[in-house]
Every structure is written in C-alpha cells, then in structure tokens.
Image (cartoon, helix red, strand yellow):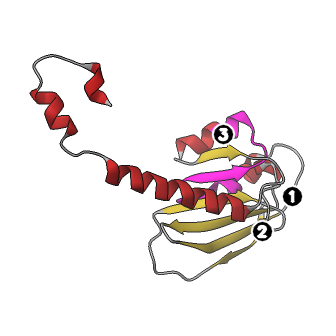
Amino acid sequence: MYHINRQFSTVCAEEWPMKVAFASSDCLHVDQHFGATPRLVVYGVKEHEVMLLRVADFSVFSGHLEEKISCRINALEDCVTLYCVAIGERVFRQLLQIGVRAVRVPATTTIGELLQEIHHYWYDKEQRKKMRDPERFARLLEEKEWDDKNLR
C-alpha cells in the first residue's frame, strides 16, 4: 500500500547545511503526532535564509502500520531535526539511527517561531566561536601544573 498522496518539492540547486521537518496539518503550526501526521513540511536553513524545500502529504490510517511509519521516515531524508507534538519511543529510536533528532513541542507552536529560534541559536553559536581564544589550549599545555582557574 502506498501512503504518500503527493509531494511538492522546490527546484533548488543550492546546498542547505541544515534541513528541518515539521509535522503539520496546515503548514503553519506543528500540531501533529509523527505517526499520524497528514503532512511533513521540510525547510532548508542557512545562517541568514530559510526556504521551503518540500511538503509531503500522506494518507492517514489508524494503527501502527510499519509501511505508514517507514514512508514518513523516508520523507525525512537528509533532515537533522523533526518537530512534532508526539512520537512513539520505538520510532524515536529509529529516527536517531538515521541521524534525525525528534523534538516534541506544544501543539500551538508555529513553524515560523521555530525557524526564528533556529536562526537565533545559529547566530549565537557563531558568535561564541568568534569569541574563543585560539591560544587558550596552547597556554594550558605549556603550564607545568594544572590550575582549574585557567579553564575559564
């Protein structure tokens, strides 16, 4: 049985360092359980840009059909994170095995809010990299005695 009803993908020659997926019924909110979601929305994320890359619509069946889950997992190809309101423990572990981290969020969370949060942490991470003292480790190696106060 085939569970993807349709899939929309943008034509994009660019490489995206991060792709994130959202379990959504309306393409605006994260409001679905991963195994029951009628739709997965995938965005590409760069430091100063986001782009809708694909939307996959699924047939919704009740129960724990392996085909239903594997179809949704296949739609997460090359994503690093999935945002959903709920996910089963077994499926959570399956996603980890393929490199996708599932994050549970409240059903009122908008996709836009999450994309802004990703950008905020991206910027913060880059700023922390720039603030690091590249000589700190070399100085620690030169010390004769270990001193915890030099780690700060």
The answer to whether residue 92 is left or right of residue 144 is right
Q: Please rate how many residues cluster around mark 3, counting C-alpha atoms within 10 Å: few if below 14, some from 14 to 19, many from 20.
A: some
Residue closer to the observer: 127 or 68: 127
Say what amino acid the circle numbered 3 marks.
Phe
**Which corner quadrant of the image does residue 27 belong to?**
bottom right
Residue at the (75%, 42%) spot, across then down = 87
Q: Going by the image, does 113 lie left or right of 25?
A: left
Say which quadrant the N terminus sits in.
bottom right
Residue 25 visible in the displayed image? yes
Residue behind mark 1: 60
At label 1, the amino acid type is Val
- In the rendered image, residue 6, in percent from the top left (x then y), is placed at 75, 74
Q: Nearer the viewer, mark 1 or mark 2?
A: 2
Residue 75 appearing in the image: no
The one nearer the camera, 117 or 99, is 117
* SS at circle 2: loop
For mark 2, what is the residue? 27
On whether residue 72 falls in the magenta region, the answer is yes
Q: Which residues are magenta?
A: 70-92
Which residue shows up at 48% across the image and 66% down it? 47
User: Dot 3 lies on which element?
Assistant: helix
Rendered location of residue 69, percent (x, y): 73, 50
Judging by the rendered image, the residue that carries numbered circle 3 is 92
Q: Residue furthest front?
A: 149
Please determine whether, in this image, residue 128 is positioned above or below residue 114: above
Residue at image location 83% in from the left, 67% down from the top: 26
- 139 lies above or below 15: above
User: Closer to the observer: label 1 or label 3?
Assistant: 3
Using the image as rendered, state which of residue 132 and residue 55 is in the foreground: 132
